[in-house]
Image: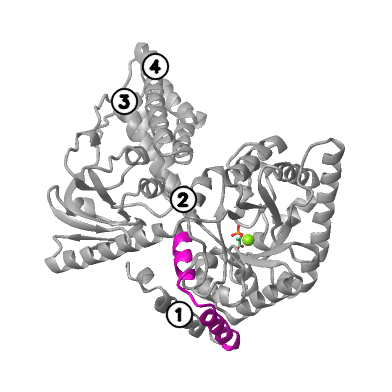
Amino acid sequence: MYRGIAVSAGVCRGKVLVMHRARHFISQREIADQDVASEVKRFEQSLAQTRKQISEVQRKVIQNMGAKEGDIFDAHLLMLEDRVLVDEVMKLIREQKMNAEYAFHAVSERYIDALAGVDDEYLRERASDMHDLTARVLDNLLEVKDAFDLRHITEPCILVGHDLSPSVTAQLNKKFVLGFATDIGGQTSHTAILARSLDIPAVVGLQAISEELETGDYALLDGYNGTVIVNPTDQTLFEYGQLLKRKASLDEKLREITTQPAVTLDGKVITLSANIEDQNDVEAVLSHGAEGVGLFRTEFLFINRESLPTEEEQYKVYREVAAALRPHPVIIRTLDLGGDKFASHLQLAKEMNPFLGWRAIRFCLAQPELFRSQLRAILRASVEGRVKMMYPMISGLDELRQANALVEKCKAELRAEKIPFNEEMKIGAMIEIPSAALIADTLARYVKFFSIGSNDLIQYTLAADRTNEKVSHLYEPTHPAIIRLIKTTVDAAHRHGIWAGVCGEIAGDPVLAPLLIGLGIDELSAAPPVVPEVKYIIRRLKLNEARALAEFALNSDSPSEIYARCQELARASAPSLFEKA
Ligand code: PEP
Ligand code: MG
C-alpha cells in the first residue's frame, strides 16, 4: 500500500498505466556566427507555437470546465511572456553561441529550482507549471511529437506518473482515466484543483510510485484516504465495494433533499446558505441546495489584478449574483483585505502582525474613496435582488457608526443623482472579534443581523494564528470561551429582535452544526459542497437534543469533552454521514 495526499475524492480500481517521464536529450552545440539569427528565430517560433498550443488547451478548458479552470493557464502564458527569462535565453544564444534548447533548458531549470525552494506552498506549486511549460517548449524545439499522447488510451486505466502537468490533466478523458496517482504534488497544485473539477479521484505525493509500479499492474486508488493498494485482496475489494455502496446511497439521499428546507425533525427552520468568492460560484450555490448566499467574500475581486475594480465593474458583478439568486438573499461582505489576503497593486507596508493590523473595516474606513465605490456598487445592485450587506472585523461601536454614516452619505448621493437603490437594504455586522461579541448588546441596536465569523473569532479569542500549523492544537472551536461568546452574541441578537448566523468553517461541519443550532443560531452559511451534508444532519436532528448538547457545552470546561459529545450526537442523528471513510 502506498500512502500519499488525497486531493480528489472517490475510489477507483483497474489496470495501471505508467507514464514515463518524457525525456529530452539536450546536448550543447556551438552555433556558427552566421546561424545565430536563425537560431534566435527557431527559439521565437517555438515560443509562438507553445503559446498557440496553450491557448488552445485554455480555450477547451474554458468551454468544458469553466472560466476559473481556464484561468490556470494564464500562469503558463505569463511565464511565456516573461521578458527576463526570454532575454536571458536570447543572450546565451547571441553571446555564448549556445543552441536554443540548451540555453532555454539551462535558464528554465534555474527558475524551477528557485520556485521549488521557496517557503510558500503556492509559489512552490508554480514550479510544476514551469515544468509543464518547459517540456512543451522543448518538445517544440526538438520536434518531439506528443511524448505521451493520452488520446491513444482506449481502455479504462489508472494513470501513474512522476507528475501530471495541468495542461495534460485538463485534457483527461474521464471515460478512460479512472483516477491518477503521482510521485509529487500537493493540495493546492493546479493539477489537484483540476482533478477536483473533473471529479477524477486522485492521490499525489506518493514519492516513487511511478518507478515501482508497472503498466498492467492492478491497483485500487482511494481518493478519500490518499492510498493506492496494489493487487488488492478479495477482502479489500469487498470492503471498498461496501464503502462505495454506502457512499452512493448517501449521495442519493443528499440529492433527494436538494430542494427540501433545512428543518429539524421537530420543525425548527434554519436558514442554510452558502459562502462564495465570485460570480462563478452561483451555480454551485443552487445545485447544492443552499438558500442564497450568507457570505460573499468580495476581496477576491480585488486581488490577482493590476488595478482596483471600478464602481461600475463591481456593480455588474453584484448585480449578476443578486439577479441569479433572486428571490434568495445575498449577503455581500464589504472588503476584507489584509491578514492573509493582499492586493499586490495596493503595495501595503508589511506589518508585524497582519491579522491584528490594518485590515478589513479598518482599512476601508481609512480609504473612504475606495470604500465609497464599493458601498455605491452594492447599493445600486440592491434593486436587482435581495441584497444585504455586512461589515467585517467590527471591533467596537465607533467603527460601526462610521461605516453606517458613510452608507448614509452614499445613499444621499445616489438619491441626488436619481440612481435607484433599495432604501431598506439590511445591514449587518460580522462578529469575529471577542470585543464585538462582548458588546453585542450595544451593536445589535445599530444593525439588522449578526454573522459570526468563527474562523477569526477563534483565532483572536485563543490568540492562535489561523494559518500557523504550530499552534493549530490551540485553535479549538469547542473551547468553552468560544461557546460562551457565541451564546452571548445570539442572546443579544434575540433580545433586540434580530437574527444571528455563523459563516465560518464550523458552520459547514456536520459535527458542530447541531451545537450551533442548540445555542440558538438562526442561519448557517458554508462552502457549497458541504451544504448537503449540513442540511442532511439538520433534517435528522431534534431541537431539544441540540439544546441539551449546548447546555452541556456551556457548563463544561473541557474542549475535548464538548467535541466528543458533538460527535456522539452527530453520529447518532445521521450515522450514514460518517461511514464513508
Ligand atoms: C471568518 O472569519 O469566520 C469568516 C467567515 O471570514 P474570513 O474567513 O473570510 O476571514
Ligand atoms: Mg473573518
Q: Counting residues from the N terminus, which is met first, the one under dot 4 or under dot 3? A: 4
Disc assigned to residue 287: 2
Q: Write down the region rendered in magenta.
A: 531-557
Task: Tell me the quarter of the picture where residue 230 sits.
Answer: bottom left
Q: Nearer the N terminus, badge 1 or badge 2?
A: 2
Q: Helix, strand or loop at disc 3?
A: helix
> In screen coordinates, is 458 left or right of 183?
right
Mark 3: few/some/many CA within 10 Å (<14, 14-19, 20+): many
Disc 1 secondary structure class: helix
- Residue 569's label in the rendered image is 1
The earlier-in-sequence mark between 1 and 3 is 3
Q: Quadrant of residue 404?
A: bottom right
> Which residue bears the numbered disc 4?
41
Amino acid type, callout 2: Ser
Which of the two discs, 1 and 4, sits closer to the camera? 1
In this view, the residue in front, 444 or 229, is 444
Q: Is residue 485 above or below residue 199?
A: below
